[in-house]
């Protein structure tokens, strides 16, 4: 069918501070890519096409976090020209690994990497897109799961809500029949508090979940970390586990801050 | 009097990231070209300090979603050197297998969806598919084989989770790898056909006097191990890398420029450099195809990197197949090691060129120092110098066309821009009077 009889939604993909991995997930849909390009009109996707059409756009995917004054301004413009905004990945939904600078002295980082810090313009924080604009849907993961990305696009094209689970990775392991790495091997695992979506990969490769899909709905991080501390896992192991790719997601942030306070209290008592 | 003429392009496309290009002209003489990189800095080397070293392969993977394995491989080899860990031949083979998966995936993407459209005035691989449905579909399927391998061996294609300091968290089961063989047998033939296809493209007559740099190993095509060598006769141990190359911070870019310490000269890394310096180490099939398509030795035409990528995809399928066929599960999948203070460095070959890492770790297993030199920061100055040579040949009155031709050259390097970079606008200052730009 041609565009005159079938109005295809106009799709845009915008990038902020990120590794490009989440938008690459779309190009990694090798079997579906040409069908997607038929179902939507790819109006703005610089990583894939030199044809860049101006907005407004029906569906806008946003990858990456806000780390510079310029990007804080640019995201407002993206909102203005987009009907529906879907943030994709841990950077866009939680600030990403670069949000570690929220806990550090930003000037130290600058000097550590760049010989001439005065050439660089950045904010002291890395923040998720939803801190700056209204976001219509968030897709988790570092990186996102491409099947979930297709589900979101399919839903939006057909005018329905995306159907994505919000339970924990822990449940996925049970469904897969993966033997629990925490119970069987004593490996600290964030599966009980981490959002489903990856397919519970890490435990099936004999390692603990490191939370790259961020906090699950109604997760109880305090209970889990207390349990681990009681069973002898040290804070130096747990703290970086909670403070990585979704460090600034509120539940993980509070849990890691609490662990840091506990460590300081213990240090003071000594 | 110099009047400024400004051409602006929204974004340099079909590369990973954004940035700009600034050209200063005096008459028809190109005085300077600045490739600006606007990628917001993310400070990986800053926040790696103090982290447990076990996390380094997971964290550095996030520098680049297109070549995470390259970051993981350089990281684990450098850390193993710091810790005095010697991996087993079985682990070494599986790491080469993993790298084959990434080369296939990344080269497949660049050849078919990013660079090939340039030869047919198409805006994207999707547009190209309307004219070459079989070739583009074959390219996608070829790329998919690489991703499937990464999923089985790495756990997932983007940011694999199975790479550990010392080896792998889990060695794959025999069946998991064996089931990939039919797809790889198809892939080997498809890669040969794809290479023949790209070798038939119409290439600009453009050669540059490069010093090309790559890893080189006496027994195998370079991936994870070897000396750092160049087409000008350099041959050093990786531990001497920082005496031969140094990074410089320039005002117009958030990516550091890496130059040779002697003479502050630029150099070229990537598939062309690898093939030029290691052609005899390619598998028989890849060498035969190289001869058949008349691939020059050495080749100094940057646009023909697409053929070098094709040859490397053939090699990757061929080598992967032999590893897959011979694979037997083994134990331990990870060599045991203890924390100790130390320092180590490694250079491996990312799809887009040599990548160097150096780490210092302390006795508690924390990272004290991290230094990462990605391929794009090494190619950046070379790209600028190429453009100075390229511009007079393509500079016309149509600014959009000029910009397109510049992008075309830049794209041939497959710059991994999220490692550092963001291309955005082209500005041209020139002596002729003219109108302003579009932005």
Image (tube, coloured by chain):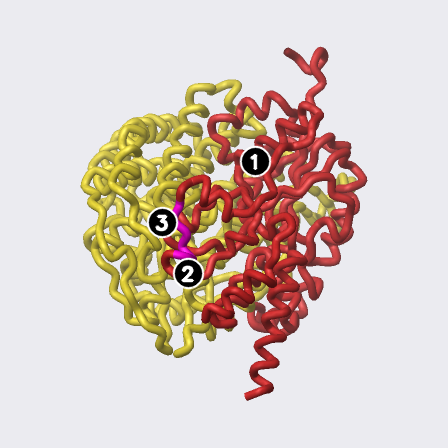
Residue plotted at (66% across, 38% down): A61
> Does A179 appear in magenta?
yes
Name the quadrant containing residue B234.
bottom left
Q: The chain drawn yellow is chain what?
A: B
Output the chain of dot 2: A
**Residue designated by label 2:** A187
Front residue of B32 and B355: B355
Label 3: element kind: helix
Q: In this image, B423 relative to B307: left or right?
A: right
Give the magenta range.
A178-183
Q: Position of residue A208 (x, y in %)?
A: 44, 56
Output the chain of dot 3: B
Label 3 crowding class (10 Å Cα cut-off): few <14, some 14-19, many 20+? many
Front residue of A188 and B170: A188
- Quadrant for the C terminus of chain B in the image: top right
Q: Are marks 1 and 3 in contact (CB under 8 Å)?
A: no
Residue A148: mark in rendering: 1
**Colour displayed for chain A in the image of the structure:** red
């Amino acid at each position: 069918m041609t565009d005159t009889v079938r109005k295809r939604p106009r799709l845009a993909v915008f990038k902020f501070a990120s590794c490009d991995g989440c938008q690459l997930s779309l190009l990694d849909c090798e079997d579906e890519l040409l069908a997607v390009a038929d179902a939507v009109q790819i109006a703005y996707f610089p990583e894939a096409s030199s044809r860049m059409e101006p907005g407004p756009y029906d569906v806008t995917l946003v990858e990456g976090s806000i780390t510079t004054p310029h990007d804080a301004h640019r995201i407002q413009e993206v909102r203005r020209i987009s009907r529906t905004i879907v943030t994709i990945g841990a950077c866009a939904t939680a600030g990403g690994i670069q949000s570690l600078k929220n806990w550090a002295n930003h000037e130290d980082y600058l000097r550590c990497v760049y010989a001439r810090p005065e050439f660089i313009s950045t904010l002291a924080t890395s923040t998720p897109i939803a801190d700056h604009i209204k976001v219509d849907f968030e897709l988790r993961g570092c990186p996102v799961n491409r099947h979930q990305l297709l589900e979101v696009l399919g839903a939006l094209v057909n005018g329905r809500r995306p159907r994505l689970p919000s339970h924990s990775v822990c449940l996925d392991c049970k469904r897969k029949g993966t033997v629990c790495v925490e119970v069987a091997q004593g490996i600290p695992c964030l599966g009980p508090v981490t959002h489903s979506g990856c397919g519970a990969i890490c435990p099936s490769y004999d390692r603990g979940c490191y939370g790259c899909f961020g906090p699950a709905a109604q997760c109880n991080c305090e209970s889990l970390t207390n349990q681990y501390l009681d069973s002898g896992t040290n804070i130096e192991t747990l703290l970086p586990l909670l403070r990585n790719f979704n460090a600034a997601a509120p539940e993980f942030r509070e849990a890691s801050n609490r662990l840091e306070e506990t460590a300081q209290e213990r240090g003071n008592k000594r | 009097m110099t009047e400024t003429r400004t051409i602006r392009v929204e974004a340099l496309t079909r590369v990973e990231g954004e940035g700009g290009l600034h050209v200063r002209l005096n008459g028809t003489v190109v005085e300077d070209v600045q490739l600006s990189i606007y990628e917001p800095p993310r400070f990986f080397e800053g926040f790696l300090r103090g982290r447990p070293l076990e996390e380094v392969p997971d964290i550095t993977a996030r520098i680049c979603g297109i070549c995470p394995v390259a970051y993981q491989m350089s990281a684990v080899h450098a850390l193993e050197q710091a810790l005095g860990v010697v991996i087993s031949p079985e682990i070494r083979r599986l790491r080469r297998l993993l790298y084959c998966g990434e080369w296939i995936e990344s080269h497949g993407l660049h050849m078919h969806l990013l660079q090939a459209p340039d030869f047919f005035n198409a805006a994207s691989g999707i547009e190209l598919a309307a004219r070459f449905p079989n070739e583009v579909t074959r390219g996608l399927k070829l790329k998919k084989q690489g991703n499937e391998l990464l999923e089985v061996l790495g756990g997932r294609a983007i940011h694999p989770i199975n790479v550990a300091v010392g080896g792998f968290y889990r060695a794959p089961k025999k069946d998991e790898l064996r089931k990939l063989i039919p797809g790889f047998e198809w892939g080997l033939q498809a890669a040969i056909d794809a290479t023949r296809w790209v070798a038939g493209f119409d290439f600009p007559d453009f050669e540059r006097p490069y010093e090309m740099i790559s890893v080189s190993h006496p027994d195998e095509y370079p991936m994870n191990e070897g000396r750092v060598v160049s087409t000008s006769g350099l041959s050093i141990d990786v531990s001497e890398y920082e005496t031969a190359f140094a990074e410089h911070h320039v005002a117009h870019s958030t990516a550091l420029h890496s130059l040779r310490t002697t003479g502050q000269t630029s150099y070229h890394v990537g598939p062309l450099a690898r093939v030029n310096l290691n052609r005899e180490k390619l598998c028989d099939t890849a060498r035969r195809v190289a001869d058949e398509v008349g691939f020059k030795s050495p080749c100094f035409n940057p646009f023909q990197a697409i053929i070098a990528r094709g040859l490397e995809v053939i090699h990757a399928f061929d080598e992967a197949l032999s590893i897959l066929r011979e694979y037997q599960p083994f134990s331990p999948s990870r060599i045991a090691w203890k924390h100790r203070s130390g320092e180590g460095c490694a250079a491996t070959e990312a799809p887009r060129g040599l990548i160097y890492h150096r780490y210092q770790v302390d006795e508690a297993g924390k990272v004290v120092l991290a230094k990462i030199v990605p391929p794009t920061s090494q190619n950046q100055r070379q790209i600028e110098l190429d453009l100075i040579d390229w511009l007079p040949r393509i500079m016309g009155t149509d600014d959009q066309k000029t910009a397109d031709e510049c992008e075309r050259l830049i794209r041939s390097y497959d710059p991994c821009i999220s490692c550092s970079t963001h291309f955005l606008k082209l500005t041209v200052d020139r002596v002729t009077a003219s109108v302003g730009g579009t932005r």
